[in-house]
Image (cartoon, grey):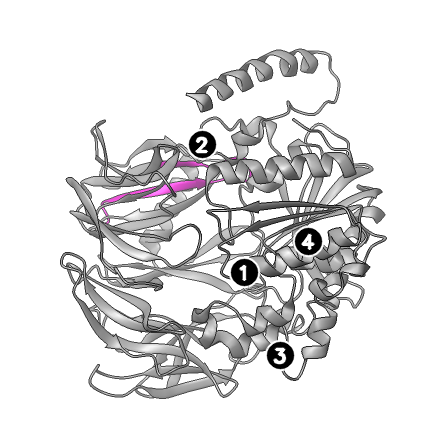
Amino acid sequence: MRYKLMLVIYGVLVGGSYGFLNGCGKEIPPPLIPTSVFFMNPDCSNYTISPDGEHVAFLAQWEYRMNIHVQRVGESDVRRLTASNHRDIPYFGWATSNRLVYVQDSAGDENFHLFAVNIDGGEPEDLTPFDNIRIQFVSTLRLVPDVMVISMNRRDPRLMDCYRIDINSGELEMAAENPGHVMIWVSDHHGQVRAAMALAENQSQLLYRETEDQPFQTVATSQIVDLLVPLSFSFDGQQLYVLSNKGQGTEGLYTFDPAKRDFVNLLYQHPDVDISFIFLSYHRRLLRGVAYIDDRLRFHFFDSEGERIQRELESRLPGYGVWVSSLCQDESRMVLQTLSDKSRGAYFLFDQPRGELSKLADISPWIEESHLCDMKAIQFTARDGLRIPGYLILPKGLKPRDLPVIIQPCSFPWSRETWGYDPTAQFLANRGYAVLQVNYRGTMGYGSDYLKAGFGEWGGAILNDIEDGVRWLIAEGIADPARIGILGHSVGGYIALASGIAKPNLYACVADYSGPTSLVTFVTSPPPYWYTSMELLYDLVGDPKEDREWLEAQSPLYHPETFDLPLLVAQGINDPLTPVAETDSFVADLRSLGKEVTYLRLEEEGHRFVRAESRFALFRAFEEFFGEHLEGRVE
């Protein structure tokens, strides 16, 4: 009820003052949109269709939490299957046409368990009822009913062993024990775990075995940073689809013959960006295409039928990106989602034989696209000549001159900022800020040279990249040099803190959300299940033995006396990546030195603030903080 009331008030404001002022013919900003409009849970999300094509399942709000619901295709009745009133369910999928599986952690600790529930209701079952474990999906098997493949660190908290699990009984069968260095497991389409990727001896290793009763053999190697990533077996089980840059350029998709220990064919390689993922047709038993992200998500098809369907859907939904997110077993029915930079989009059901396209739901129908802002891909040149990509969001209704600016560095170097609806950026733009998102050197997705350019540069060239983006905005006349702030989450939070120390004359204020304060702790005490990726982490950040002095020098925790800017820090107490005790200590040291610090410390949260009320508190704090120091609008 309170959300509906808030939306009614929002509608009155939009229909009143906004419409009247537009009639004056003046260039004005859109109405001030309530914080909760951006950060409340969506009405629904994650629509997916059952293997038999008879039902759709989705997440929808119940008791202000996202829970699984199911609906028969063509009918209006909806059945709620779960009753989580403490924490959202983040992800689920169909195991069979009658049973769904989902994951959930406790209070943000990221120890995800696997649960199952039937579509006719009943109490959900925890299929992995073990203490202090974390599961990951390896494969949902379309060709083997009632069985899926997962990895789990039950035997050793550092190592993800591979299991087949009966999703009805919960019976576990170990399919492969981690020898101590496997990062990725790959099963064939019948559930036999026959390939893996490992990091060892400063190499990326492709492992293979013909059958599960044989030991794994190393069939290919590359430098550790030139990751050799197995994605899937071919449907005949004889070849692998692998990502590799073969030592140079961007990652391409290859077929690899493990019996001959050699690459067979290069299927696709983009000249500028890596491949993001592949998609298969289980009905036709073929590789359908690949996806990659340059300025936005794009596809390359190997299958003419898949390309025809994609083009038809795009023509029927003009102005939006279209992503087929779920197909039934025979591919006669499929769920698709529209993609936009100014809304969360909508879900549609496409009946392919009939050619019928019907809307299932808008994800967040209260978001008014006309009030939100374009997200534009940009590039600027760093001081050493490297081209740095990112996105610029300019506030609507204001001339792009002398604006207050908030810099958003990428949260994780092993990911990247992408085009699409970003509630944080749109919220800030609605408050009158230009927002620059920077995919600094070391960000994955742009090839091995770009990745390696960031190695050991977390307190060095990466901070210069961020500064060079600010200088570019100032030179373009967009930024007011006196009103520039930086807001970062996770590694982006570290970058924000480190920038505040290294570039104090550039910024007016700093906001950090779950950012590590110590690089020493970051590389010596990560979550235990990061163990198999530590060699790569040392390359990215630094070796705690050889580079300890440098790591300490770049860690804000050890230098509170050098931090002189207004600061807002947000931290969940159950964060498995950023120890709350270190954040507490850093804030306490700053305050003892008389520094200006606002500290938002939340229980029941981890590295990300998942609960809606936590997000509301977080972004209201950001709004007031930036309003005070950068003079943006405040609700």
The residue identified by callout 3 is 544
* Circle nearer the N terminus (1, 2): 2
- Whether the residues at callouts 3 and 2 have beta carbons within 8 Å, the answer is no
Element type where label 4 sits in the image: helix
The residue identified by callout 4 is 587
Q: Magenta residues, as a range?
A: 331-347
Q: Is residue 357 magenta?
A: no
Residue in the picture at 75% in, 42% down: 405
- Whether the residues at callouts 4 and 2 have beta carbons within 8 Å, the answer is no
- Where residue 138 sits, quadrant-wise, is bottom left
Tell me the amino acid under the disc marked 2. Answer: Ser
Viewer-nearest of discs 4 and 2: 4
Q: Position of residue 571 (x, y in %)?
A: 58, 50
Gap between marks 1 and 2 measured at Cα: 26 Å
The residue identified by callout 1 is 415
Q: How many marks?
A: 4
Tell me the amino acid under the disc marked 3. Answer: Pro
Question: Callout 2 environment at 10 Å: few (<14), some (14 to 19), or many (20+)?
Answer: some
